[in-house]
Amino acid sequence: MPDNRTDRFFRYLNWLFNPFHGLETTEVYDLIGTSSLTENALYLNLGYWRDAETIDEASEELALLVAKRGGMRPGDTVLDCGYGFGDQDILWARKMKPEKIIGLNITRSQVERARMNVADAGLVKSIDLREGSATEMPIENESVDLVVSVESAFHYRSREDFFREAFRVLQPGGRLVTADILPTEDSRNPFRRMEQWFSWNLVAGKFNIPIENRYLIPFYNDKLRSAGFVQIDIRSIRDDVYKPLHDYLSENRTFVGKLHPLAKILAQLTLNRSAESVYAGLDYILCYAEKR
């Protein structure tokens, strides 16, 4: 086994089974590679399951929920922060038909694959996927109508920097929409609170959620207001995300078969636990805000 493959194997092993070992965001997604939950695409989101029966349908439904909440429409210039493999941008270009979609992503392996996917879809004129940071956007002031971030803002160092940058690049009247992961409010039951603590810290450690992004919905609202946003609306949609996803994966373990043999062990152990336990510490929000 060449040295780079050996190094990758042991980094993967350490990440999977060492609860105190985390990785940088780009390293996490490089290790995950194209092991998407979906069966026919490369979506990386957890899905919105209210009217969905498969993971592919749920992933598309979440992307469309974000787009519709932001009022994405023809003529818009959209900035997608953390676009993964570009599936959501292709979906939006075909169904919502904005004038232009610009994407920012810091994981080079995803950038390269996403650009190939966009080219294969024949959409290079309307989708411009770039390598760049959502906290230091290489985007002009007041040049964007809608900023979206689907399951990526929790990674940013910090989310507040992202809010400030989003406000800067939005035109007056522009909109921000995030699908984001936050901790749940602590239970009064000490055993449930311990379960919440373990659930949050396991996910935060493995998927590089910095400590400065650990706060509840009221603080999320406050930080948006501090950045200048108005008409803020934040609602939890966790009941339409975590449990139906867990139930689906427990019954349809196609995704598990895609994983590294070591990762399969961890996935099986996770799926054998109840959704209430696995996701006890995780809230999931859909957030809308405007720039006056």
Image (tube, rainbow, N blue to C red):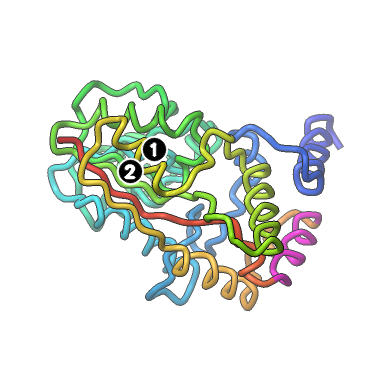
Q: Estimate how packed mark 1 is, as few (under 14), some (14 to 19) or many (20 or more) residues with alpha carbons within 10 Å.
A: many
The residue to which callout 1 is attached is 81
Secondary structure character of the magenta stretch overall? helix
The residue to which callout 2 is attached is 148
Magenta span includes 13: no
Residue farthest front in this picture? 188
Query: Magenta segment, which residues?
Result: 262-273
Q: Is residue 182 above or below residue 159?
A: below
Q: Amino acid at mark 1?
A: Cys
- Left or right side of 64 for 281: right
**Residue at horizontal 71%, vertical 70%?**
273
Magenta span includes 264: yes
Q: Amino acid at mark 2?
A: Val
Coordinates of residue 279 in the picture (x, y in percent) = 60, 61
Coordinates of residue 124 in the picture (x, y in percent) = 31, 39
Coordinates of residue 72 in the picture (x, y in percent) = 21, 50
Q: Estimate how packed mark 2 is, as few (under 14), some (14 to 19) or many (20 or more) residues with alpha carbons within 10 Å.
A: many
Q: Quadrant of the N terminus?
A: top right
